[in-house]
Image: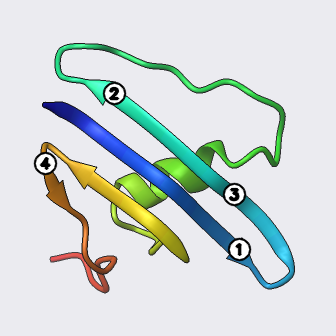
Amino acid sequence: MNAVELRNVTKSFGKTIAVEGLSLDVPLGKVYGSIGPNGSGKTTTLRMIMNIYNPDGGTIRLFGDELRGACTSVD
């Protein structure tokens, strides 16, 4: 089982494509880092994994469970 699985994840803001077709597996017990220039989609990807943003396409799974809909409030 993977801790995180992304399959063909995309996210746009208007005409700006922030993440396009990203697929990634992070196995349980492993630590991954994300590096890249400003505007390359690192923060957007993390926000989708944290269920703050909804992806426009693709699927995200955490510990085997698919994320469904970003949270709308913080309790």
Between discs 4 and 1, the one toward the N terminus: 1
Residue at which label 4 appears: 64
- Residue 34's quadrant in the figure? top right
22 over 53 or under it: above or below: above
Crowding at dot 2, Cα within 10 Å, few <14 / some 14-19 / many 20+, comes out as some
Type of amino acid under label 4: Gly
Mark 2 belongs to which amino acid?
Answer: Val
- Which residue corresponds to mark 2? 26
Of the 4 image quadrants, the one containing the N terminus is: top left
- Residue bearing the label numbered 1: 12
Q: How is the image coloured?
A: rainbow
Residue at 34 percent of width and 65 percent of height? 51
Label 3's element?
Answer: strand
Front-lying residue, 37 or 3: 3
Q: Earlier in the sequence, mark 4 or mark 3?
A: 3
- In the rendered image of this protein, does residue 17 appear above or below residue 44? below
Foreground pick, 70 / 64: 64
Locate residue 60: give its quadrant: bottom left
